[in-house]
Image (cartoon, rainbow, N blue to C red):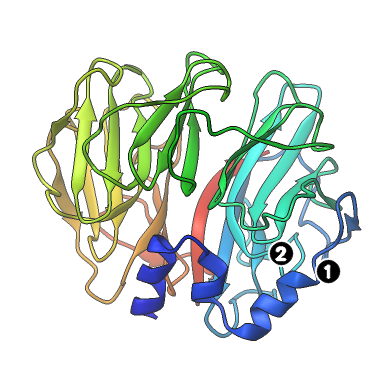
Amino acid sequence: MNLHFKKCIRSKSVLRVVFPLAATLTLLLSAASGALLAPKVAPPEAPGAPRLFAAVFIVRGSVSGNATGGYGVYVRGEGDTAWTRISRSYALTFGLALFDNGRTRRYYIAAGNGVHRSTDGGVTWRILTSWRTEEILGVVPDPVDSAVVYAATPFGVFKTTDDGATWERKMAGIPTWFVQRIVMDMRDRRTLYAATESDLYRSTDAGEHWRAMGAGLGQVLALIQHPVHPDVMIAAGENRGLRRTTDGGKTWSATRGLDSATIYTFRASRTGSEIYAAGWKTGLWRSTDEGLSWRQVWSAPGIEAVYSLFVYPADPDHILLGTVGQGILESPDRGATWRPLGLDGAQVKQIELYP
């Protein structure tokens, strides 16, 4: 699995490298645009109380809990001991997103067969995408205009302005196609960052035009913006460690620690006093000086990679890790001790707490 996983990161066609022929053929049977997909199981509770959402990309064997295994989105309510899948099992899931303006709530899935959307708390799902690109690596809804959604794919940035009826590729200024993820600036929804195989790119006009930021990493795998000081950003590259900017991307410098690591994910506490990073055979690292320096707080020789992190907003000591093959691990004490939280066997791409 190690070789397959690393190829997954580097490949222009993720699914063709990682998955066997049977899984690929399953994807080719994906529903046409607009098809309504009913889940195999009902969601554990109606939207309202915060629940943990986990994006499962691939499963080794079966998933623990009361689910029968498979890819997709799993949900666990507060006090529950089992995870319930609320998406179709063939939705190879790369990421999650939520649109919630207080009146309308929409859940999004970035999946191997398109962008999925649910407007009823996960009871039903609709595939929004209709173009031939099926490998959606990330989905970012506009927080104000529900008709606008961005998608990161191995074939570029795509955008819809009509709620998924049509999609356009938005790559003016980006010379290479592969886009690992899109991050929206917390101050301005028209400012976007695209992590690509050649550099980090920024758009200030909602994706119409892009400019290289010169982060000095080559391929960019992850990016985080400080929650309190947004001009501070940290980017991660494959085997290139981290680069940090304090002036909104005008200049970049190396950090202390993680010099040659491959980092897949960042997460910050609500105040940004602590920022966590993890990736390929790194264990868990923490910075308490806005990403300037890092130290390892937990080593896990038996875990080949950590692909997702979550820090509870109300309790910064409470941390979750989404691993490759060992499901989700939970620490109540800032990484001093750990316990399993289920989804054993799963590669967990993203963890979120959504209503």
Asked if residue 44 is positioned above or below residue 51 in the image, the reply reads below
Q: Which residue, as the protein is rendered here, is positioned at the far left?
A: 256
Quarter holding the C terminus?
top right
Q: Residues within 10 Å of mark 1 (few under 14, many from 20)?
A: some
Task: Report the front residue among 158 and 283.
Answer: 158
Q: Position of residue 135 (x, y in %)?
A: 62, 57
Residue 77: in sight, yes or no?
A: yes
Q: Determine whether, in the image, residue 180 is placed left or right of residue 165.
A: left
Q: Determine whether, in the image, residue 38 is placed left or right of residue 242.
A: right
Asked if residue 74 is positioned above or below residue 293 in the image, the reply reads below
Task: Report the front residue among 18 and 223.
Answer: 18
Q: Residues within 10 Å of mark 2 (few under 14, many from 20)?
A: many
Residue beneath the point at 62% across and 50% down: 78
Residue 68: in sight, yes or no?
A: no
Identify the amino acid type marked 2. Arg
Q: Position of residue 327 (x, y in %)?
A: 47, 68
Task: Report the front residue among 304 and 315.
Answer: 304
Residue beneath the point at 70% across and 44% down: 108
Residue pointed to by mark 2: 85
Give the spatial CA distance, label 2 vs label 1.
Answer: 8 Å
Q: Position of residue 111 (x, y in %)?
A: 65, 57
Identify the amino acid type marked 1. Lys
Quarter holding the N terminus?
bottom left
Residue beneath the point at 35% across and 78% down: 3
Q: Position of residue 120 (x, y in %)?
A: 85, 43
Residue pointed to by mark 1: 40
Q: Quadrant of residue 25?
A: bottom right
Q: Secondary structure at mark 1?
A: loop
Find out whether the residues at labels 2 and 1 contact each other: C-beta distance under 8 Å: yes
